[in-house]
Image (cartoon, helix red, strand yellow):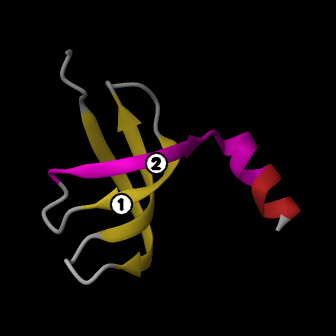
């Protein structure tokens, strides 16, 4: 399996935290050196491990904001 490269380019905020210290966060993340997208997922305290999540383009994030 190919290695996934990622860089959190902007930490926007924490949505929640589990008893084990993992946090569900909204960040701007660059995946495999591509332009950053909005990203919601759980992260380990050191941000080395992550759970499944969702990525949204700027347009999708604007639409989500409108819907909310």
Q: Is residue 57 above or below residue 35?
A: below
Residue 44 lies in the magenta-colored region? no
Q: Write down the region rendered in magenta.
A: 48-62
* Residue sitting farthest toward the top: 1
* Residue sitting farthest toward the front: 19
Report which residue position mark 2 lands on: 53
Residue 56 lies in the magenta-colored region? yes
Residue 62 is left or right of residue 45, and the answer is right
Report which residue position mark 1 lands on: 42
Identify which residue is drawn at 26% across, 70% down: 22
What quarter of the picture does the C terminus occupy? bottom right
Picture coordinates of residue 42, whole percent (x, y): 36, 60
Dot 1, how many residues are within 10 Å of its Cα: few (below 14), some (14-19), or many (20+)?
A: many
Residue 66 is left or right of residue 20, and the answer is right
Quarter of image, res 1: top left
Residue 38 is left or right of residue 47, and the answer is right
Q: Secondary structure at mark 2?
A: strand
Identify which residue is drawn at 28% across, 37% down: 6
Q: Is residue 26 above or below residue 3?
A: below
Q: How many marks?
A: 2
* Residue sitting farthest toward the bottom: 19
Q: Secondary structure at mark 1?
A: strand
Identify which residue is drawn at 46% across, 38% down: 36
Q: Which mark is residue 2?
A: none
Picture coordinates of residue 60, whole percent (x, y): 73, 43
Name the residue nearer the viewer: 55 or 21.
21
Picture coordinates of residue 44, whole percent (x, y): 20, 63
* Measured Cα–Cα span from mark 2 to mark 1: 7 Å
Dot 2, how many residues are within 10 Å of its Cα: few (below 14), some (14-19), or many (20+)?
A: few
Q: Are marks 2 and 1 in contact (CB under 8 Å)?
A: yes
Quarter of image, res 34: top left
Q: Earlier in the sequence, mark 2 or mark 1?
A: 1
């Amino acid at each position: 399996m190919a290695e996934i490269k990622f860089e959190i380019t902007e930490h926007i905020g924490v949505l929640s935290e589990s008893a084990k210290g993992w946090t569900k966060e909204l960040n701007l993340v660059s995946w495999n050196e591509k332009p950053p997208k909005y990203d919601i997922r759980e992260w380990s305290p050191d941000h080395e491990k992550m759970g499944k999540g969702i990525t949204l383009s700027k347009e999708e994030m604007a639409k989500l904001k409108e819907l909310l």
